[in-house]
Image (spheres, helix red, strand yellow):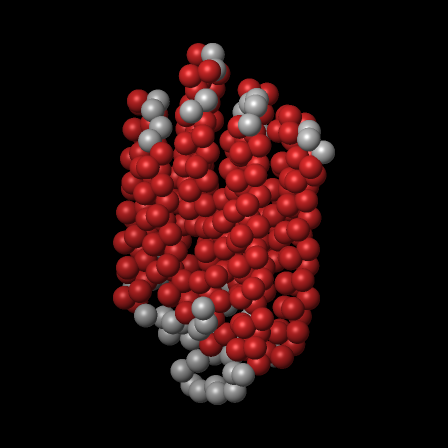
């Protein structure tokens, strides 16, 4: 099985959905500040939001191309899974199409009207979450017994709320840095920190139950696949998870430190804290997802 193909596929979709949801939240706050900005700044803000929508659409398009029905398209990413239920693949593909179509249509609408509608963005994000739900069901019902656990849902959804904030800070907060003032930059950074903190904490709380469940797996039959050298994989995965937790914390500290030192403008104007923190968050998520797919 090509773990890296599955990792890339899931993270692309998770990044798209997370970015849409976070951009909806950021757009809500930014719209309340537009009246106080110059017209040239407003135009720049519109360009930033359009670029964010285009990135989300591109990621969604790549995810859709990868999740095409395996019955008709043998090159689909799902051909690496065994004993999957084609009905779940079809449902996931339908929601992937709906999510991508709505996102592209709204991006075109925004390109023409230059008006952002927060609730439409959030609705599109919810459709993306539904798509991820059915995507997770495919993995839960595949032949790999170590994926047949609620941990799979935690992994898929928590990644949305780590990758999304990291991308939103990088694509929205950082480019707008020199135009932000007052409490708005604090809101943008604190929102990303809070979302990531909740996501990582929930995953960390769930992990002991998952590890206990793994230790109790004793039945293996012809209808399931248990990882090769399972005991070695479980032990090595624990070390990798510890590394990912540490990286999550480091990324959050990098974003938090300038706020703690009351240097909000330094955090926003200086690309290093935001971009380095986002890069570390991305690496942490890659490691965490790798530990899932090798198990």
Q: Position of residue 83 (x, y in %)?
A: 37, 74
Total tally of numbered discs in the picture: 0
- The residue at 63%/68% (across/down) is 237
- The residue at 52%/87% (across/down) is 218
Residue 228 visible in the shown view: no
- Left/right of residue 223 with respect to residue 72 in the rendered view: right
Q: Position of residue 116 (x, y in %)?
A: 35, 28
Q: Position of residue 180 (x, y in %)?
A: 55, 23
Q: Quadrant of residue 70?
A: bottom left
- Left/right of residue 199 with respect to residue 119 in the rendered view: right
Work out which quarter of the rendered image holds the C terminus and state it: bottom right
Q: Looking at this view, is 155 or 84 the one in front? A: 155
Seen in the picture, residue 34 relative to 29 is either above or below; the reply is above
Q: Quadrant of residue 34?
A: top left
Residue 224 visible in the shown view: yes
Q: Position of residue 90 (x, y in %)?
A: 28, 60
- The residue at 50%/49% (across/down) is 161
Seen in the picture, residue 142 relative to 163 is either above or below; the reply is below
Q: Quadrant of residue 43?
A: top left
The furthest residue to the right? 261
- The residue at 47%/65% (across/down) is 152
Q: Looking at this view, is 111 or 133 the one in front? A: 133
């Amino acid at each position: 099985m090509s773990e890296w193909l599955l990792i890339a596929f899931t993270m692309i979709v998770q990044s798209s959905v997370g970015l849409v949801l976070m951009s909806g939240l950021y757009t809500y706050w930014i719209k309340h500040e537009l009246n106080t900005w110059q017209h040239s700044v407003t135009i720049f803000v519109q360009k930033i939001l359009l670029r964010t929508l285009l990135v989300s659409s591109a990621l969604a398009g790549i995810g859709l191309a990868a999740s095409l029905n395996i019955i008709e398209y043998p090159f689909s990413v799902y051909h690496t899974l065994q004993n999957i239920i084609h009905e779940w693949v079809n449902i996931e593909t339908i929601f992937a199409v709906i999510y991508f179509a709505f996102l592209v249509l709204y991006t075109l609408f925004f390109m023409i009207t230059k008006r952002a509608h927060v609730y439409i963005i959030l609705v599109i994000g919810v459709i993306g979450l539904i798509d991820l739900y059915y995507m997770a069901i495919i993995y839960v019902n595949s032949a790999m017994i170590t994926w047949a656990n609620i941990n799979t849902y935690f992994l898929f959804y928590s990644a949305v709320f780590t990758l999304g904030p990291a991308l939103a800070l990088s694509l929205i907060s950082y480019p707008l840095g020199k135009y932000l003032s007052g409490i708005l930059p604090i809101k943008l950074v604190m929102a990303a920190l809070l979302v990531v903190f909740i996501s990582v904490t929930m995953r960390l709380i769930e992990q002991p139950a998952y590890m206990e469940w793994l230790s109790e797996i004793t039945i293996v039959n012809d209808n399931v696949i248990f990882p090769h050298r399972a005991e070695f994989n479980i032990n090595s995965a624990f070390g990798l998870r510890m590394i990912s937790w540490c990286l999550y914390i480091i990324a959050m500290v990098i974003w938090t430190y300038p706020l703690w030192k009351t240097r909000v403008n330094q955090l926003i104007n200086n690309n290093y804290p935001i971009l380095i923190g986002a890069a570390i968050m991305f690496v942490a998520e890659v490691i965490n997802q790798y530990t899932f797919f090798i198990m």
